[in-house]
Amino acid sequence: MKEKKWLIKNAATEDTLESVSKISEELGINAIIANLLYCRGYRDVASAKKFLYMESEILTDPYEMADMSQAVERLALAVERKEKVTVYGDYDVDGVTSVCTLYLYLRSLGLEVDYYIPNRIGEGYGVSETAISAIAESGTNLIITVDTGITADVEVAFAKSIGVDFLITDHHECRQVLPEACAVVNPHRPDCKSKFKELAGVGVVFKFLCACEERFTGKSRAESALSIVSEYADLVAIGTIADVMPIKEENRLIVSYGLKKMEKSPRLGLAALIEASSGKNEAQRFANKRKQIKISSSYIGFTLAPRINAAGRIRTAGMAVELFLTEDYEKAYRIANDLCDANRERQNEENRIIEEAYKKIEKFGYDKMPVIVLDADNWHHGVIGIVSSRITEKYSRPSILISFEGNEGDVPMPDDIGKGSGRSIKGMNLVDALCHCQDELVKFGGHELAAGLSVTRANLDAFRRKINEYAKETLSEENMIPTVEADIEISLSDVNLSLADDLRILEPYGVSNPVPSFVLKDITLTEIAPVSEGKHTRLAFTDGKNVVVGMFFSCNPDTLDIYVGDKVDVLFNLDVNEWSGRRNAQLIIRDIKQSEALRSRMNAEIQRFSEIWSGARFEQSENVIPSREDFANVYRFLVSSVRCGNEVLSVRDILYKLSGFRGSSIGYIKLLVIIKVMQELNIIGIVEVGEDVYRFSMQYRSGKAELEKSNLLRRLRTQQNN
């Protein structure tokens, strides 16, 4: 594993302890939570109270958004004329929830409503003239886009030419020229006066509905907003969380309402999806007796959102839309189970693509480039975005995956269109990078850290070269060092069930209000064990008095260069593990490494070996020169390991396992001497494959090894002080 740089944001000092203590005492909250609030910028009682109880969060005036009045009046005209309206959306979770929210509201106005979401594989992202023609033929007079459309200037002009009006609601980056629609509602318009810009696509729809409710009912602005919140906050919350929008200010308020609504009275389709996600098969069990599930941002992000997304990635997004629109529980449960099946298909396809992608990176050295651009003819368009995220996380640099799947003919042609999905890191705005390369692209769009594109096979190499040239000018080496952030350092005695429960006062979590992360330093590892055939790792720690257990998900214990008895530092989130009616505090480990004390000791041993190997004299008490028994123990251990298929071992791995092998007390310096002598005398095949990492192989030998013939041993004996 690449070692990550830890960024601990802040910690209470003598100068800040008084403020932290005051926040804790006056608000009656745990001192650690008060410290968290202080470190996150809430540095007095008033600001901390406003954050916790959302006293300062208000729903801003929707009419501050550019073109909102025009949008509302065009919809009012549609109601007056009884026009058919089609909602045109995107196939991700934000797009699906946007479509459902607007569809349900328009239907409540008595309008004839239809929806259209392009097929990811056949059509790709965005508005198309083919789709517009089909929608027009169905009798639609007005198309309202949600979570898409901001770059559809050509398509909107085409719609206008055949008598179809466009009303655009979107939240993606705008270009210099906007489509000539009846209205373009997007907080990122340069002329938009809305104070809060970080809305999801469904958040923009929410603002549109608030304005419409005020116009159509005559209610006050506050009453209209409350009405829309009470009806649609759950869908808005799901889309906002899934699209990784900042959970602050207006978003924090809406998401908070939405989570409560989902927990107390989830709409039918959502209830079915929660039940199907739990793995239970009895369709009526949820309807009759449901176990209370804590609905949190994490639950939506890691459990519900992937299943909703799987519809657009593996099947069609219409499945997910129908789940939220249906009023038939049997149908909802059937769709929910289909979404779970689609998600499993997505996971299998994702694993296949990631393996192929890693092989390409290793073979061609793409990890040496600032931007990894990979392509293939058979990668599923719906999965490459997820794989791109994993590659970017692993290599700490932007990545773009392009698939030419779906092109006609068996022979690759220069004009084949590849559809790509990319992810970026802090330091490089992906949309700006694609703008720099737009001459090589068919089309593109997206956000700062995630975007989609289309490129011809003929232009692929030029695109790869051009975006890497841009990245070399934009990204620094520091940008590409993997980092993980933590809030504060605490003691093991602080880690308990009470703190884990109290932390929930900070919810809902998300971007700008992440799940609190902590650091424990210099604690002793007492257990390390694989879980689920090595997919995850279970660890236990102690400070001599207290013991705590942690889970390191998606991490095989063999990738961690730590061993029982080591002093380690741990970066983690704190959670509650519920099992068989018992509740315990549990670490959700995000990173772990050797403590400074252990590193210092190891570095001293490395330095001392280097000095001795270079000719420095040493004392007999340093235990440098191995005995024949030492050689025999190491040899037997290595032979046993190789026979079991463990050919590659680190020095620390050997030392740890040797300690339980015939009670060996061999240290670092002596072990390296043994390895060097074995290599010299060809006792066993040894190849150094990394720093203190070796590959061992069996060598056929007859008779005992003649250690006295080793020049290395003879030289070392002359260096030892008698």
Image (tube, rainbow, N blue to C red):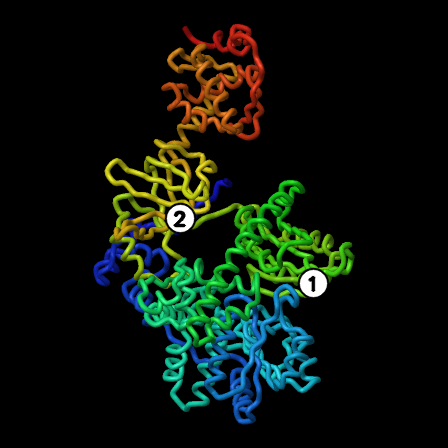
Q: Which secondary structure lies at badge 1?
A: helix
Residue beneath label 1, please?
A: 438
Q: Is residue 698 above or below residue 362?
A: above
Q: Amino acid at mark 1?
A: Gln
Residue 397 percent coordinates (x, y): 57, 50
* Numbered mark located on residue 8 in the image: 2
Q: Nearer the viewer, mark 1 or mark 2?
A: 1
Q: Is residue 585 above or below residue 415?
A: above
In-front residue for pair 251/458:
458
Judged left or right of residue 145, residue 580 is left
Residue 48 percent coordinates (x, y): 31, 64
* Cα separation between marks 1 and 2: 39 Å
Residue 671 percent coordinates (x, y): 46, 20
* Numbered mark located on residue 363 in the image: none
Q: Amino acid at mark 2?
A: Ile
Residue at 59% in and 61% down: 451
Residue 151 percent coordinates (x, y): 63, 72
Residue 184 visible, this orientation? no
Residue at 63% in and 83% down: 138
Q: Which secondary structure lies at badge 2?
A: strand
* Mark 1 vs 2, N-terminal side: 2
In the picture, the quarter occupied by the C terminus is top left
Residue at 65% in and 51% down: 374
Q: Residues within 10 Å of mark 2 (few under 14, many from 20)?
A: some
In-front residue for pair 447/675:
675
